[in-house]
Image (spheres, rainbow, N blue to C red):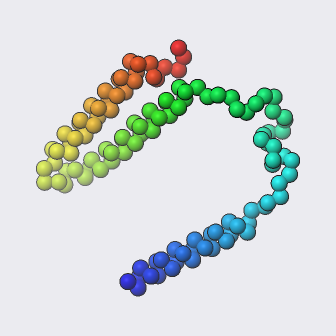
Amino acid sequence: MNLLIIMISITLALSMILMLISHLLPDMSPDFQKLSPYECGFDPMCSARLPFSLHFFLVAILFLLFDLEIALLFPLPWADQLPLATTPYVYTLILIILLGGGLIYEWLQGGLEWAK
């Protein structure tokens, strides 16, 4: 219990110190250049609110989906220590087949094509 109180007090003290430092250190003197939407040295030629293609969002979502699903495979090396070691490998094979099927489906639907 004593160690828990020490850890909580160190965490709270460090958090308070970091919040105080972050409040005192920044230079809050805005000028014309800092308030402008561009800091590259020239005035903007057109609006910064250009619409993005939905294809960029689709590719980003697909990347996140497949990237997060691959994270499910990280505990696989420890599956050998289980009493019935074949079960995680069967689940992994099913997961890889589903991911491959989803990738093939997106490929056939044209979701991965950049130019149409």
Q: Pick out the residue farthest to the right.
A: 32
**Could you tell whether 25 is left or right of 6 in the image?**
right
Image coordinates for residue 94, horizontal then vertical, percent = 23, 35
Residue closer to the observer: 98 or 77: 98
The image quadrant that residue 29 belongs to is bottom right
- Residue at (19, 50) in percent of width and height: 80
**Could you tell whether 112 is left or right of 78 in the image?**
right
Image coordinates for residue 42, horizontal then vertical, percent = 84, 35
Image coordinates for residue 52, horizontal then vertical, percent = 61, 28
Image coordinates for residue 114, horizontal then vertical, percent = 53, 20
Residue closer to the observer: 115 or 32: 32
Q: Split into 4 quadrants, where in the image is the N terminus?
A: bottom left
Q: Is residue 27 above or below residue 7?
A: above
- Residue at (50, 34) in percent of width and height: 60
How many dots with numbers?
0
- Residue at (81, 47) in percent of width and height: 35
The image quadrant that residue 3 belongs to is bottom left
Q: Pick out the residue farthest to the left.
A: 84
Q: Is residue 67 above or below residue 17?
A: above
**Could you tell whether 97 is left or right of 58 in the image?**
left
The image quadrant that residue 21 belongs to is bottom right
- Residue at (67, 71) in percent of width and height: 20
